[in-house]
Structures are given as structure tokens and as C-alpha cells.
């Protein structure tokens, strides 16, 4: 099996699975319980919070655990808009965001907020000049992702954060860092965001767990009510084994980040070089050259994405025909449409994404398989 779909999700590290299994059996206490088992669970929770906060140079009090990227994003956008509506109505976003952001913003639009979309270039890179021009006195919220999940484009979020904050300190900035964490250094001292969303399953951690960074001094209206966990911001019994698994995966991934990205770059180069040896393939690279190393999006004009995906699947090669959430709907990806890719390229786009377990030999095998499928 060759798994080149790591931006959809990753195989957890063995040590992460072992830790989660052990904690589920031995440390099943509720971190809110007053007895010894509860106190032990709480210690694991707070230790994980401390370590995860350190990975982004944040304080433990700035970390809220959630069920993943989608919930973190919903919480940041909807939860802050509810508080900020007293100061204004205007929201700015890039149009190439994940649906977790776009759908949350559409819901805010239905509630009466004015949402404007920033201009992007042919790789989905947001225009900072347009951002400068669009910021208004009543702009309460700006939303830009750190790395695009379909093209691998690295967005200028640090520069954007400085522009936003020098224009108006009270404009809140949310960054979706789901595809950036563990691949790029993220540091809350350089990136002046108020909220940053993270997910465990993209970095060889478990599914169903993530975190939201909330800069000290900010306020959120909860979107989930109950027993008052996580400083009353996100109720629900804490998923201690998965949180500890998330923490271990993050530490491992960040520890090997440079090495993994270097390997991904070589895998990407081999894949392109091998494919380019047969010009009759007629391929078109949709990702920018300076994009994140572990994602490459290529169109094979001669075959629709779904057909290619299924042919490769027969050879036990797993790729994506866009972002995972699009692949089940028979529509063209909004990202590829937004960047102005002609329909024939958008409908034949394949995303290859690499992780810790991939090897250089796999790139050669995948290139050969594609040539077989295209009969060149
Ligand atoms: N944001 C981006 C950029 C993503 O790629 C994804 C997952 O595909 C998400 C958010 C959603 O994260 P989760 O699957 O943890 O809900």
C-alpha cells in the first residue's frame, strides 16, 4: 500500500496508539473527579496542555481542547463574532479556506454580518494590498489559513497579522493552522493572531481531538454548553487518552519536522521528475514552487480525477481528488475554481500529500503507476 493522502488524514505513530490504548485501560478517570483516579487524569491533561502550549510558544492558559480543527474554527469564528458584534459587523476572509471556515462564515452572514472575500493569486495566495484596502473601522474579524490544504500554498499570515494589528488592535485575527502545524514553525510571538486552530489527526495523532489557541485577554462566547470544562468555554468530559496522544504526536512530529519536510521535498521532486520524463502525459502543476513540501497538486488533462483515483486505488495507491470533503461530492473544488484554474485542469486534479511514513521509492512507483494508467 502506498498512502499519499496525508493531508486528508495520517496513520497514527505506533507509540501514539500504544499510549492511547494504555491510558484508556489504566487512566480512564474523569479529570473533574475529586478522587485519586480523577486527579491523575487531570495531571495528564494539564501536562499535555503545558507541552502543547510550548510547541507554539504560548501559555497553557491559552489552550482550549476541542474535538478537532472543525470545532476549533467554528468556536473561534462564531464564538468571537458573538462577542464582537457590539463593535462592528464587518468580516474579511480569504475565499480558499477550508469549508469549516467558509460554512461558519456563511452562517454568520445569515445572522446579518457582512462577509467580504479577499483577492487571491493563481495559487490562492491572499493579496496583502487588498487586505490593507479592505480593512475598515468596523472590521471585527479577519480569517486566513496558514497553509492551503489543496494546493499547499503558504499564506502570508505573519505579515497579515502585523497589517491587521497596526490598523486596529481590536480587530480579531483567526488563523487555521491545521495543515501548517508540524510542517512549519508556528510561534505566537511572531504570528500576532488572536485565535489559531489545530488538529491532531493531520500529524500522526488520533482523530477527534484538536486545540484552539486563544491569546490572553480575548473573550469567546461558547458554542457548546454544559459542565463548564475548559474555563467554561468548551463543556464535555475531557478525552484524556486522545489529548495525551495528540501531545505525543505533536512532540514527535515537531522533533522530526525539518527531516520530514526535507524528505517530502525529495519525494515531490522525484514524482515530478519521473512524470516529466513522459511529456505525452500532459500534466499541469497547480501548486506553487514555494508551497509546503508535503503537498503537490497536479492535473492530468487526459483523465478525470475520480477515474485516476480509482485506477490508482486498484494498485493500492491512495491519493485525493481535491480536499477530502469534496471528493465525495461530485463538484469541482472551490479552491481550484477560485484560483481560476480552467475546468479541464480543475476536473483532472490530483493531490498527493506526504507524511512521516513515506519513502522516495514510493514516489517512483506512483509515477510508474500513473504512466500505466494513462497508457504512456
Ligand atoms: N482546516 C484545514 C485546512 C483542513 O485541511 C482540515 C481537514 O481537512 C480542517 C480544517 C478540519 O479539521 P478536522 O478534520 O480536524 O475537523
Image: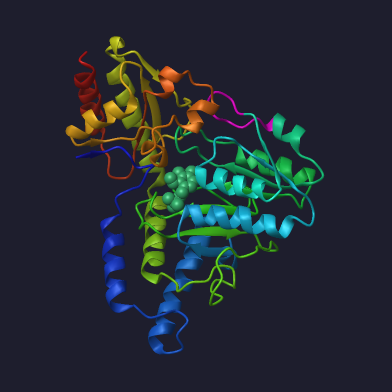
Quadrant position of the N terminus in the picture: top left
Please say whether residue 141 is one of the residues in the magenta stretch: no
Question: Can residue 178 be spotted in the picture?
Answer: no
In the rendered view, tell whether residue 54 sits above or below residue 310. below
Q: Does the magenta portion include 126?
A: yes
Who's the residue at 75% across and 55% down the image?
A: 85
- Is 93 in front, or is 279? 93
Q: Residue 108 at x, y = what percent?
A: 65, 49
- Up/down of 344 relative to 334, above or below: above
In x, y percent, where is residue 368?
21, 23
Q: Position of residue 265 (x, y in %)?
A: 37, 32
Q: On the picture, is 78 further left or further right than 334?
A: right
Q: In the image, residue 293 lies at what x, y percent?
A: 41, 34
The kind of secondary structure the magenta stretch mainly shows is loop
Residue 87 against residue 370 in the figure, above or below: below
Residue at the location (30% across, 37% down)? Answer: 4
Q: Which residues are magenta?
A: 120-128
Amino acid at each position: 500500500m502506498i498512502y499519499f493522502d496525508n493531508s486528508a488524514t495520517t496513520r497514527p505513530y505506533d507509540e501514539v496508539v500504544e499510549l492511547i490504548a494504555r491510558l484508556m485501560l489504566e487512566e480512564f478517570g474523569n479529570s473533574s473527579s475529586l478522587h485519586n483516579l480523577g486527579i491523575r487524569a487531570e495531571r495528564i491533561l494539564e501536562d499535555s496542555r503545558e507541552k502543547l502550549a510550548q510547541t507554539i510558544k504560548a501559555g497553557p492558559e491559552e489552550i482550549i481542547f476541542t474535538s478537532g480543527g472543525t470545532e476549533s474554527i467554528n468556536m473561534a469564528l462564531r464564538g468571537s463574532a458573538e462577542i464582537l458584534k457590539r463593535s462592528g459587523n464587518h468580516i474579511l476572509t480569504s475565499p480558499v479556506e477550508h469549508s469549516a471556515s467558509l460554512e461558519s462564515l456563511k452562517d454568520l452572514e445569515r445572522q446579518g454580518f457582512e462577509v467580504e472575500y479577499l483577492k487571491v493569486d493563481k495559487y490562492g495566495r491572499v493579496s496583502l494590498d487588498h487586505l490593507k484596502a479592505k480593512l475598515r473601522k468596523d472590521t471585527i474579524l479577519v480569517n486566513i489559513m496558514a497553509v492551503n490544504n489543496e494546493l499547499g500554498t503558504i499564506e502570508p499570515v505573519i505579515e497579515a497579522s502585523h497589517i491587521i494589528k497596526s490598523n486596529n488592535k481590536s480587530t480579531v485575527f483567526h488563523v487555521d493552522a491545521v495543515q501548517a502545524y508540524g510542517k512549519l514553525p508556528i510561534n505566537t510571538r511572531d504570528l500576532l493572531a488572536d485565535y489559531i486552530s489545530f488538529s491532531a489527526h493531520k500529524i500522526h495523532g488520533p482523530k477527534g481531538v484538536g486545540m484552539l489557541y486563544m491569546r490572553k485577554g480575548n473573550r469567546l462566547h461558547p458554542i457548546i454548553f454544559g459542565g463548564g470544562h475548559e474555563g467554561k468555554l468548551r463543556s464535555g468530559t475531557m478525552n484524556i487518552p486522545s489529548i495525551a496522544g495528540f501531545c505525543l504526536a505533536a512532540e514527535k512530529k515537531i522533533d522530526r519536522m525539518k527531516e520530514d519536510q526535507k524528505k517530502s521535498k525529495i519525494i515531490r521532486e522525484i514524482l515530478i521528475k519521473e512524470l516529466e520524463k513522459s511529456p505525452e502525459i500532459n500534466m499541469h502543476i497547480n501548486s506553487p514552487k514555494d508551497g509546503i513540501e508535503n503537498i503537490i497538486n497536479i492535473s492530468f488533462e487526459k483523465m478525470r480525477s475520480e477515474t485516476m483515483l480509482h485506477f490508482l486505488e486498484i494498485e493500492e495507491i491512495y491519493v485525493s481528488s481535491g480536499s477530502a470533503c469534496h471528493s465525495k461530492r461530485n463538484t469541482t473544488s472551490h479552491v481550484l475554481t477560485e484560483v481560476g484554474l480552467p475546468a479541464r485542469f480543475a476536473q483532472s486534479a490530483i493531490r498527493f500529500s506526504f507524511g512521516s511514513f513515506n519513502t522516495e521509492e514510493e514516489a517512483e512507483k506512483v509515477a510508474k503507476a500513473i504512466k500505466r494508467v494513462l497508457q504512456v
